[in-house]
Image (spheres, rainbow, N blue to C red):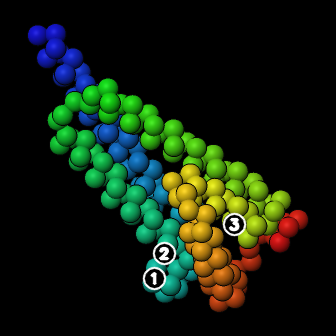
Amino acid sequence: MLLQDKRKFKIMSRLRNDVISGLILLVFALALHLFIIPAQVDSMNEGPIALSPSLFCHITAFLLLLLSVGLVVSGLKDKKARTARDMSQIAYTVGRGATAILFSVLYIMAMEILGYFTSTILFMGLFLWFSGVRSWKGGVLFLSAIIPFIYLLFVKALNVILPSGLII
């Protein structure tokens, strides 16, 4: 009887975590679409949304909405309990996610000092290593292809002004 109660508790905590997370993301996606995007992104009053600067923002909010609904549905459908091994895998994944967020914050801060391209080369190399790419030749090949592509697309074709720092 006690084992069955523990199993029910594990199932309910799993359901609560996924469903609650999904509902929070759902509310955030709706807030993005209904309040934040209209208040923060300039809209062009003439023409359809396809020509508006807010198009990408609305697409992102819609995708977040779909993913949150999927999380709620999977939380309601999944009936199996998590084992200790599953929980350690989750802790490992959360730790890696937190580290990636920390790297992203450091990347944004370094951009002001080093400039866009220098910080991008450094942090893309760091992210490649963090993601498990151990071949330095592959990393150099990837960076030597992606950096000119970013430069040509954003600086030359789209005339985007990227941050410049002490090192350009």
Marked residue nearer the N-terminal end (1 or 2): 1
Q: Classify the position of the C terminus by image quarter.
A: bottom right
Residue 151 image point, x, y percent: 68, 81
For mark 2, what is the residue?
55
Q: Is residue 43 visible?
A: no
Comparing labels 1 and 3, the label whose residue is closer to the camera? 3
Residue under circle 1? 50
* Mark positioned earlier in the residue sequence (3 or 2): 2
Residue depicted at 44% across the width and 41% down the height = 93
Let me know if residue 8 appears in the view: yes
Q: Please say if 9 is above or below 95.
A: above
The three-letter amino acid code for the residue at tag 3 is: Ile
The residue under label 2 is which amino acid type? Leu
Quick one: 150 or 139, which is closer to the camera? 139
Residue shown at the point (23%, 47%) measured from the top left? 73
Where is residue 126? Give x, y as percent.
63, 56
- Most distant residue in the top direction: 2
Q: Is residue 85 above or below residue 46?
A: above
Query: Which x, y percent locates residue 108?
Result: 70, 57
Q: Amino acid at mark 1?
A: Ala
- Return the residue at label 3: 121
Q: Quadrant of residue 80?
A: top left
**In the shown orientation, is residue 65 left or right of residue 5?**
right
Q: Quadrant of residue 22?
A: top left
